[in-house]
Image: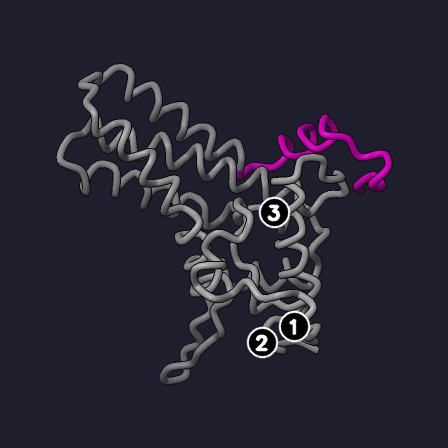
Amino acid sequence: MMKTRKGFTLADGIAQFCRYPSPWMIAAVLTGAVTARILVGDWQWTDAVVPLAMVAAFPFFEWVVHVVILHWRPLAFGGVRIDPLLAREHRKHHADPRRVDLIFIPWRALPWVLAGSIAIALLAFPRPALGLTFLSFLMILALGYEWTHYLVHTDYKPRSALYRAVWRNHRLHHFKNERYWFTVTSAGTADRVLGTYPDPAAVSTSPTAKNLHALSG
């Protein structure tokens, strides 16, 4: 059970966060990637460019994953229902935003996500060292995503202006209208560019914010 907003501290959040498998799985890959990166060496200027590019691209990556994968509407082809695990679990998350285990990337899907990330790091870069730089920073971003998404769904009260904006946007997505405010770790950056950052006062409250695609009930 979560404590009430008044009693829930950042220390409480960290303790609860560390009880779930997803952060540990990501941290394990991060530890391995950083260790391998240090051992390989071969530092070049591109090792600074890749993280900067990833920071710039990550809000758009979040947006695409959220819109295309997590909000996937189930389809049927030839009697076969196409409804990925990530989409099914995300619908449960919208139905019960305070259920802590549904906040995290599903641990059953995470091994495939991590394996795919490792494969990209090993195969898509001209230098193994640069691939390890990519993998290390991707795991940092993933861990930051898990922490931010988790904290927004707790009763920890926003204190900084930046976190308050992130908190507000994601709460609007869950409790105002699920068709807008798709970024999670930034204050609506990709949403502003891609047209999903309206004035909340001009948006009607959606009846399906907790029942994506009206698939239940």
Q: Residue at the location (62% across, 54% down)?
A: 169
Q: Earlier in the sequence, mark 2 or mark 3?
A: 3
As measured in the structure, the alpha-carbon distance from the residue carrying label 1 to the one carrying label 2 is 18 Å
In the displayed structure, does residue 48 sit left or right of residue 158? left
Image depth: mark 1 or mark 2 in front = 1
Give the SS element for disc 1. Answer: loop
Q: Which residue is mark 2?
A: 213
Q: Which residue is mark 3?
A: 166
Q: Residue at the location (48% across, 34% down)?
A: 25
Q: Residue at the location (41% across, 83% down)?
A: 79
Q: Which residue is mark 1?
A: 203
Q: Earlier in the sequence, mark 3 or mark 1?
A: 3
**186 vs 216: above or below:** above
As measured in the structure, the alpha-carbon distance from the residue carrying label 3 to the one carrying label 1 is 18 Å
In the displayed structure, does residue 88 sit left or right of residue 214? left
Picture quadrant of residue 157 = top right
In the displayed structure, does residue 31 sit left or right of residue 41? right
Dot 1 amino acid type: Val
Q: Label 2 crowding class (10 Å Cα cut-off): few <14, some 14-19, many 20+? A: some
Magenta-colored stretch includes residue 169? no
Mark yes or no: residue 54 visible.
yes
Give the SS element for disc 2. Answer: helix
**Position of residue 2 measured from the top left corner of the image (x, y, whole percent):** 79, 41
Q: Which residues are magenta?
A: 1-22
Quadrant in which the C terminus is drawn: bottom right
Dot 3 amino acid type: Val
**Position of residue 83 measured from the top left corner of the image (x, y, whole percent):** 47, 69
Q: Residue furthest left?
A: 126
Mark yes or no: residue 85 visible.
no
In the displayed structure, does residue 182 sit left or right of residue 217? left
Image depth: mark 2 or mark 3 in front = 3
